[in-house]
Image (cartoon, coloured by chain):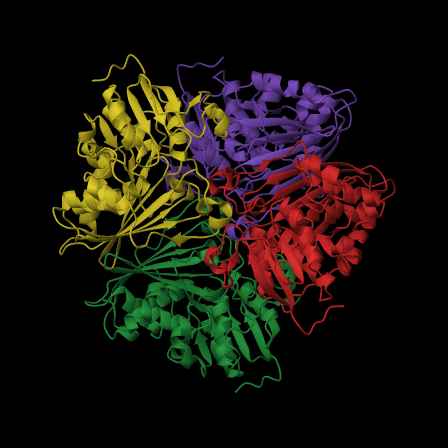
Chain colours: A purple, B red, C yellow, D green
Amino acid sequence: MTDLSRRLRVAVAGATGYIGIQCVELLAAHPHVEITRLLARSGAQRRFREVVPGSAVDLPLEAGLDPGAVDVVLAALPHTVAASHAAQWLAVGAAVIDMSADFRLRDAAVYERWYGVEHPAPALCEEAVYALPELNGEALCTADLIAAPGCYATAALLAVKPAVAAGLVEPDIIVDAKSGVSGSGRSPSLGNLFGEVNESLKAYAVEGHRHKAELQQELEAVANAAVRLTFVPHLAPMTRGLLATAYLRPRPGVGHDDLRAVYEELCNAHPCLRLSDGPPPTKSVAGTNLAALHVGWQDGTAVVTCALDNLLKGAGGQGIQALNIRFGFAETAGLPLRCSWP
Amino acid sequence: MTDLSRRLRVAVAGATGYIGIQCVELLAAHPHVEITRLLARSGAQRRFREVVPGSAVDLPLEAGLDPGAVDVVLAALPHTVAASHAAQWLAVGAAVIDMSADFRLRDAAVYERWYGVEHPAPALCEEAVYALPELNGEALCTADLIAAPGCYATAALLAVKPAVAAGLVEPDIIVDAKSGVSGSGRSPSLGNLFGEVNESLKAYAVEGHRHKAELQQELEAVANAAVRLTFVPHLAPMTRGLLATAYLRPRPGVGHDDLRAVYEELCNAHPCLRLSDGPPPTKSVAGTNLAALHVGWQDGTAVVTCALDNLLKGAGGQGIQALNIRFGFAETAGLPLRCSWP
Amino acid sequence: MTDLSRRLRVAVAGATGYIGIQCVELLAAHPHVEITRLLARSGAQRRFREVVPGSAVDLPLEAGLDPGAVDVVLAALPHTVAASHAAQWLAVGAAVIDMSADFRLRDAAVYERWYGVEHPAPALCEEAVYALPELNGEALCTADLIAAPGCYATAALLAVKPAVAAGLVEPDIIVDAKSGVSGSGRSPSLGNLFGEVNESLKAYAVEGHRHKAELQQELEAVANAAVRLTFVPHLAPMTRGLLATAYLRPRPGVGHDDLRAVYEELCNAHPCLRLSDGPPPTKSVAGTNLAALHVGWQDGTAVVTCALDNLLKGAGGQGIQALNIRFGFAETAGLPLRCSWP
Amino acid sequence: MTDLSRRLRVAVAGATGYIGIQCVELLAAHPHVEITRLLARSGAQRRFREVVPGSAVDLPLEAGLDPGAVDVVLAALPHTVAASHAAQWLAVGAAVIDMSADFRLRDAAVYERWYGVEHPAPALCEEAVYALPELNGEALCTADLIAAPGCYATAALLAVKPAVAAGLVEPDIIVDAKSGVSGSGRSPSLGNLFGEVNESLKAYAVEGHRHKAELQQELEAVANAAVRLTFVPHLAPMTRGLLATAYLRPRPGVGHDDLRAVYEELCNAHPCLRLSDGPPPTKSVAGTNLAALHVGWQDGTAVVTCALDNLLKGAGGQGIQALNIRFGFAETAGLPLRCSWP
């Protein structure tokens, strides 16, 4: 049980990437949290507000990965970095909420196959809890090592897993996902230059994207069977926003209403989900920690779309939602839920 | 046989919509064509260059739909309008190349079901030739009433039909398509306002889009069987560009190379097709009459993507390509084939 | 003095335009306010959340302009409409905060010259208080008819008026302003279509823009002299955001530090102003009610830039800031002040 | 006199930056030119079409800066690089058209002040011809070392210099310029990431931009007096396009018509200039080598706007236009002059 009389001390590791920035801004306004340390190799010797336009957060950036005395480390680091430090963070009594891929796969061998590196802490993989709050909520409450799924996995799982778990669809699934450019991070590369991606849209990783591994893991856990999944990500010319379009083949006798009922129940039970009357535009949830779901139907095929803000519900917001649940705060404490159109 | 010693006289009907504008600009630079009349209800009493920024075409816009003495009417009109006038255009000896949906469906009853209006000229439906030049080229050479497919159908058919025609895939197909905003035309409406669509992406017509009818018609013609097609269009925040991502289930024994060979042969045979080494970004073909194809493979599912410029290869450029073929000009006469990155 | 024990009853007139939407979303989360009625001709018979993507505000839209029993009418209507109704709104005891141009000009004859219509309520023009809170704050506290300046005027006045009022610059001023497309409203027209404005930037109203009149009025009030102002607005391809770049000629003996000190003092005194270390990007204040100012200096010419969110500090947010001041709430109650990059 | 019976041999140095790419694509379709060598450190060992999406140019990229046997070196390199190699290129008989800043300033000391490095070839500075074809055309015809002005200088000089040269305006000038992001090149940096610049606009280099030096040099050459110039560049969220808005104070007795007549005559005399009826949107010249000019007038101040495509008329297109003039080809040979809206 958390002592609510004092603020939770949180360090953010990787504070100057897009996900880290999002975490810092949310935590700075969080009612139950105090940011104690911002760790960021690239920004060291400067203050947060000097490297983040528009920010009012006036804290120093530190180079190392020593979080000091904290209750939680919120990590938004390149893969392998959090895994290399998690054990020592846990050893000093901090809970770890990792937003990289390091602890999402229970099987370190699968990690090594997809990421092409040895896992720095294979023993921790089994201990970690995969934390998509609406689908894995209970396990979160007592976990010390939490792996928050990323934007693609969050949208795809919210679109697909409820139907699979309810046994309503065949385990033969196609997910066509479209992400805004901020999903590729704040490190400059040809692939996220304005001139290269504006006024353009493309598929990538057609032969198999890294996040497919965790999708398969999570779906097979509820399908109790092999799941054939085709997952193709696309890059769209926008900063924030992600849409997953899932194509599901209903089992014999399953109708549109049966399927819709499952998602309706889920959305009613969770404050960050919305069931949408029509296919949701990503901008309708941009700037919020909401995921909007729509259950469509075309000549016997179910078309479920899930829209979210890749940096919020698909990353930093989700991490804080997990923190809220883990420490007994209101699930949406400090999380924006209102879109402001346009 | 066309007399190449004089320029072909072409009237453009619907000259001030985005497709019409594209046609006019291309025809104005076409080596074998003379624009004789520009018909546009909305712009009447003005000159083309007054209503189209950047244009150097200084011809008057006329209100009616009388093309005068012409060899060809190129029509970019709302549906039902071309169908209402085609008979009289044909009667005065003009060939008609229609870029609306009016003559794409061979069965007027299907048209009426999808468009909710009576077909103005059902007798002409059977006479019309569906003109995706790379897939229906021969029929074009002698046709007088040509229905040019639109952007969604062009991309989807180029991605899917070669595999279906070759008998390499199951007739159970998913096409997830993403279009730029210019596809919705130049008539102002809430749905194409900058503030509504910028920084956003959404699915629409999930329950069934009008262009699905012609896709089904064209695929079933080569499948010799019922085709189960799921087609979902999306709106992406860019002006030009369309990407179709097709998910195909290979028949037993069919491998990636078998499939790739079919598309390679097609691309080698046609000057407006390119087989791409990786999934093509839409901007790599923007401003050109090219369609770029890529044949991917993910754990036994084929993922074929087709990128094109929705106003060129997906509309006006295709109409002129059809004109070139019909009148014996070089297939790419007057058509831009070079992208200029970025 | 306002009775803080009950919520202020506010009706929004023109609730479904971009400014109206912004007001409604802010008021719905405002700690001291209750929305009592949403008036919107275009949306009548529907509920707010049905016409505004992503909104959770589930109130009906009503067609007329009768606000019922309210403390305040917040009006975001086309010009002449608020002026036609203000007298009756005031008569039933409501304060009126108008975000149109109707009550910004003290002289109805000037209004008629620029807007080309008779002013519907010339007698009220003198009574109205021009409400840019940081520059006209005191007058607001007791006003019943408040004219909130729009985006161009707010940015230009914040950039220019402090220097003019301090007597530091010559009354010969150039303001080059750049606005996002949402400034032109949510009514569809060729000028705000995605295809027309994306990937483009242009000047407009070069011969003289309507908002020049109020700029001249407000500047001359503090200059005690004629002010020669050249004001050119530009349309930029973004949804939100406005930047005014002001070119000021310092009086003899006035240096960069003298000028900077004036703006620094102003920014320190007002919670919605920020003095920026470098020229502020508009996105650094997007989604907030902040205006960011920078005082530059190039070879003896002062270059003052002001960035703001045209729908917040340049419209709806400003209206609510005025409401807060008028009714004795904290000036920033219900107003977002944190940017979330990117 | 150029021997038109054989193609001119041209090497492009810096072929894989945005300006270099533009040159290569234009030259590949140029009727009188043969590309003999593509030099590009970053792309070495690859072929052009492998590093440029959508390109059909299948030539190898070479690492060094040895152009081989050529008639012309077209250089699009970072500053100091062309200056370090120009002497040896000239020595083997090649003409050099440089699109960097290296040879734009006649006085090497001024170069060193603005660029903070020693000029590698100060002796060549005086020999070089500054080549904005419409303003310095004659000198071009015999020059061997040609410095093509960049996007900001081209737009600003076309907007301002005709009026200064005609003696119609005071030598006290403000130019507010707005550029698309491709102007900052293809090398990845935080400043040209999609996430940093999309949906945003900002001023930069307010204290004085490098290109101010050449503007001052070129204006003072025709003013025969000191020119007070304030030049502020802005970054706008678009790939291509640049707009310069110039504020000019007419001399006593000079009216709008006097000024307009000067620009009209200039535009009539040059095939790449257009006098526009209203302020030109940048997109109306995007993809072309045109500059569109508009002469506005606001209460006695002249407002001249110039729109161009920063990679064409503001860079690579201009270089080829200079090449055409230098070698006696038609001035617009190989240059696109038609915009295709939208």
Residue furthest to the left in view is C224
Is D259 placed left or right of A329 in the picture? Answer: left
Task: State the residue at coordinates (62%, 42%).
Answer: B178
- In the rendering, at what x and y percent does residue D56 appear? 65, 63
Find residue B212 and report its image quarter: top right
Task: State the residue at coordinates (18%, 32%).
Answer: C123
Judge whether residue A140 can be spotted in this image. no
- In the rendering, at what x and y percent does residue C141 appear? 20, 26
Find residue A222 and report its image quarter: top right
Is B171 placed left or right of A130 in the picture? Answer: right
Indicate whether C240 appears above or below B30.
Answer: above
Is B179 placed left or right of C101 in the picture? Answer: right
Find residue C40 and report its image quarter: top left
- In the rendering, at what x and y percent does residue D310 appear? 46, 61
Q: Nearer the viewer, residue D270 or D316?
A: D270
Indicate whether D243 appears above or below D140.
Answer: above
- In the rendering, at what x and y percent does residue D62 appear? 61, 68
Judge whether residue C120 can be spotted in this image. yes
Residue furthest to the right in view is B253
Indicate whether C140 appears above or below D193.
Answer: above
